[in-house]
Image (cartoon, rainbow, N blue to C red):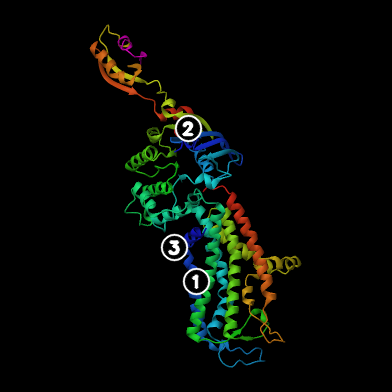
Amino acid sequence: MSAEAAATPVIEARGLVKRFGVRRAVDGLDLTVPAGTVYGFLGPNGSGKSTTIRMLLGLISPTSGTARILGHDIRRDRVRALRGVGAQVEAPSFYGYMTGRRNLEFLGALTGPTPRALVDQAIARVRLTGRDGDKVKTYSQGMRARLGLAQALLCRPELLVLDEPTNGLDPQGMREVRELVRTLAVEDGMSIFISSHLLSEVQAVCDRVAVISHGAMVAEGPVAELLGNTDGLAVLRLACQAPAGVDPVAIASAVPEVREAQSQDEYLIVTAPAERAAAVNAALVGAGVAVSELLIVRRSLEEFFFEVTGEESSL
Amino acid sequence: MIVLLRWEIYRLHRRFAPYLLYAASTLLIGLMTWGMRQDRHAFRPNRGGQMEIVGDLRNGLFECQAVSITIAMLLLYLAPVVIGEILGGEGAAGTLRTMLVRPRPRWQVWLAKYATAWLYAASIAAFTMLLSLAIGTLCFGWGKLTSVSPASEGKIIVMTAGEGARYILLSYSLMTLSMMSGGTIAVALGSWFDNALAPGFTAVGLVITLQIICGMNFDWVEKVKPYLFSNYLFDHAKAYPIAFDPDSGRLLFPGAAVWPMVRVHCVTIILFATAGLWRFVRRDVTC
């Protein structure tokens, strides 16, 4: 990838608005996806994720605003914009009466000349070898999801847009997709824009995330930054019983690099770098404090998501 | 574009529904042949006592013409149902969005589907024509065509086999045009709505409604009738000569029946095809 190409965002949306009647599905969304990143796109059901993805791919026209894909305006220059894009939008749909391979050959032909080797490679990558000659109507939901990934990979895209790619996959399949996404990003240098409701998946594979709610962006940035882990501090929760005259708070506070220690309910809460957990434990045990439990409490993307969207259970 | 068209044709003929029309055509031709074999006297008409036909009218060309005038009409109602599914069915199945995220201009996708609809209609007409010709020739032999055009007002025109074949080809071509008037409406509706069956059935419903209107005895109906394609839907049966040129003795081309039909069908097709394409290129794919 040239320096210029690397500097150009693969997705750049400015003031994207989509109205369906009086309802604003997307409300002035600004989005910049740098090249070479795995970008997570999160939001509760009905928050405008799919509408945004459809606008980015030229499936629906924005009411106002612009979207540029790989430097090309999606409305004015849709064909050139999509030339370097592989996409899977929502549940993958195929022609059930055709084999998996035939479906890929057809979709490949829509993109341009697709050598047999490229189809073979895509099939192998999603582990469908051996079943590619079967009709799609005989495929399980998971196999269809894999075929959806295969068709997105057909044109060796610069940008891969995946809308809920792990839907219908078993845990093994999910892990394979996670690994595939990382491989595509690291080894093939692909930029990946991934929308998923599985927050742990997103946290595991994405470099940056954007969270939208009611059609508007509520948070955006590198995952570590959003989760407040940039200073390297973690919260340690200890269940301990101190002998008379021994103050666990004072002992923990005296351990080097401990930022703060306090007693909360029956627990001792210590803010310190996670790697200092053993030192805190040793200091307490050394002072005769019986430590029955030590937990490094990390803020998860899920907690962060609920904080910024105000949602509790509607993912 | 050629690649797209090739794939569309491949996909069309990988499905079950399109074969129903071929099957219907085969069955109806079979029944008609059986009927013609059973009652040969029906094909020796005595035209109002003025003329006694000696011999047998029946042959391959005669059966082929009879099929185009009678049972092939049914295809005009059935074709839009299958054709409407070519585009509307894609939206309903969700495959449309998979196609449209590919770097292809939407007009190319639409055009490939529309061209496939034309090829399908033409293939149904060609199949019906060739099958009736083959079965008729096998059962009754080959020979001159005794034309019984509905426009002849009782006149009988006997053509050489070569002339007969040419006019039969014209008649079936016009039948394709009629099929595609309804078919284009179905494609246009399929460009609007994501439904496999609704575009086809709505198009047939519209055709039937317009036919009913054309049959009404009102002044305003008489005024609009010449501009409605439904008024010419079965006029492919009139594409046979009904007179000779008195000077040259050659058959006169039935232009009075053919040209208005061609004009109105072409305008209808262009109108609905433009509307369908316009919509398809601009529409939001939300399915």
Between residues B168 and A18, which one lies in front from this camera angle? Answer: B168
Q: Secondary structure at mark 3?
A: loop
Q: CA distance from mark 3 to mark 1?
A: 18 Å
> Which stretch did the figure color magenta?
A250-264
Q: Earlier in the sequence, mark 3 or mark 1?
A: 3
Asked if B201 appears above or below A16 in the picture, the reply is: below
Tag 1: amino acid: Ala
Q: Residue tagged by mark 1?
A: B24
- Residue A263 within the magenta-colored segment of the rendering: yes
Residue at disc 1, secondary structure: helix
Residue under label 2, please give it: A210
Viewport quadrant of the C terminus of chain A: top left
**Quadrant of residue A232 in the image?**
top left
- Give the alpha-carbon distance from disc 1 to disc 2, as whole Å: 57 Å
Chain bearing tag 1 is B
Q: Work out which quarter of the rendered image holds the N terminus of chain A and state it.
A: top left
